[in-house]
């Protein structure tokens, strides 16, 4: 089913997800502090009529589903700048990672996670954590010579997770595992770190985890 999808952000993740979702038949609004800046023109050309570049507020207002694709350092400020009514009762996909890279990558948060904090910021929305474990290069139509990568979701609302499952399927994900409620985003954020460290160790950027099955 075609939906309006509002993406907070027009960076690496916002652009690639916007493109994938537009190609899958959705109407997509990516967003920026400077929506009219010429740097967005290439993306607009790529997606044509299916995509718009707009303000953060308008992306949230018009999105039936909202994707928060912003650096952790500014996510709270951007969310707080938007009328809470625009988020109410909607599915909000959180792809963020709260991480710092000095002296080896580490998670910034202890005894909580970005997913849980986003859910606390938006108590009237249904936050679903996903896609944070892979690089933007493989967020859409992931293809590997061997095996099928796994994508995890977590969140408190079953209907929202069902919606996100459909979106991930649209983006070419075939192995999707529901880990449970939003507290499980701790696992996903730790897995992201394990993946980044593995990629560095194995000199293999753009990798993803898969589950070996008999
Ligand atoms: N990149 C990846 O491979 C990847 C993979 C998995 C998860 N993630 C997570 O996805 C999220 C987005 O990553 P990204 O790589 O897309 O980030 P990015 O390219 O740095 O995102 C830039 C976006 O954030 C906005 N932004 C930056 N600073 C801002 C500020 N102070 N106030 C308001 N808006 C600001 C920019 O707005 P303007 O357009 O106005 O400049 C732009 O739209 C992060 O939490 C990251 O951890 C990234």
Image: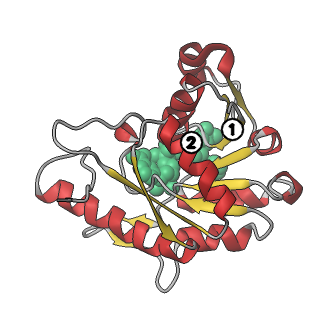
The answer to whether residue 99 is above or below residue 148 is: below
Residue receiving disc 1: 5
Does dot 1 land on a helix, a strand or a loop? strand
Task: Categorize mark 1 by other alpha carbons within 10 Å: few (<14), some (14-19), many (20+).
Answer: many
Give how far apart the Cα atoms at labels 1 and 2 are: 10 Å
The answer to whether residue 113 is above or below residue 21 is: below
* Residue located 76% across and 54% down the image: 90
Depth check, front residue: 47 or 98: 47
Depth check, front residue: 176 or 94: 176
Residue receiving disc 2: 167
Image x and y of residue 5, in percent: 69, 38
* Residue located 75% across and 66% down the image: 122
Image x and y of residue 22, in percent: 59, 26
* Residue located 17% across and 36% down the image: 145
Image x and y of residue 196, in percent: 27, 58
Q: Residue furthest left?
A: 202
Does dot 2 land on a helix, a strand or a loop? helix
Mark 2 or mark 1, which is nearer the start of the sequence?
1
């Amino acid at each position: 089913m075609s939906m309006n999808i509002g993406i907070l952000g027009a960076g690496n993740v916002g652009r690639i997800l916007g493109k994938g979702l537009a190609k899958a038949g959705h109407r997509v609004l990516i967003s920026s502090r400077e929506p009219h800046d010429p740097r967005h023109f290439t993306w607009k050309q790529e997606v044509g009529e299916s995509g718009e570049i707009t303000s953060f507020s308008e992306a949230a207002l018009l999105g039936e589903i909202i994707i928060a694709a912003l650096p952790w350092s500014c996510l709270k400020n951007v969310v707080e700048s938007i009328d809470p009514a625009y988020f109410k009762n909607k599915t909000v996909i959180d792809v963020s990672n709260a991480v710092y890279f000095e002296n080896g990558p580490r998670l910034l948060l202890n005894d909580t996670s970005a997913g849980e904090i986003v859910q606390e910021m938006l108590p009237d929305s249904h936050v679903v954590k996903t896609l944070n474990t892979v690089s933007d290069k493989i967020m859409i139509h992931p293809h590997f010579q061997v095996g099928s990568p796994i994508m995890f979701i977590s969140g408190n609302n079953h209907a929202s997770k069902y919606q996100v499952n459909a979106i991930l399927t649209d983006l070419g994900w075939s192995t999707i595992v529901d880990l449970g409620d939003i507290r499980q985003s701790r696992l996903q954020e730790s897995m992201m770190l394990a993946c980044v460290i593995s990629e560095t160790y194995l000199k293999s950027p753009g990798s993803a985890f898969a589950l070996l099955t008999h």
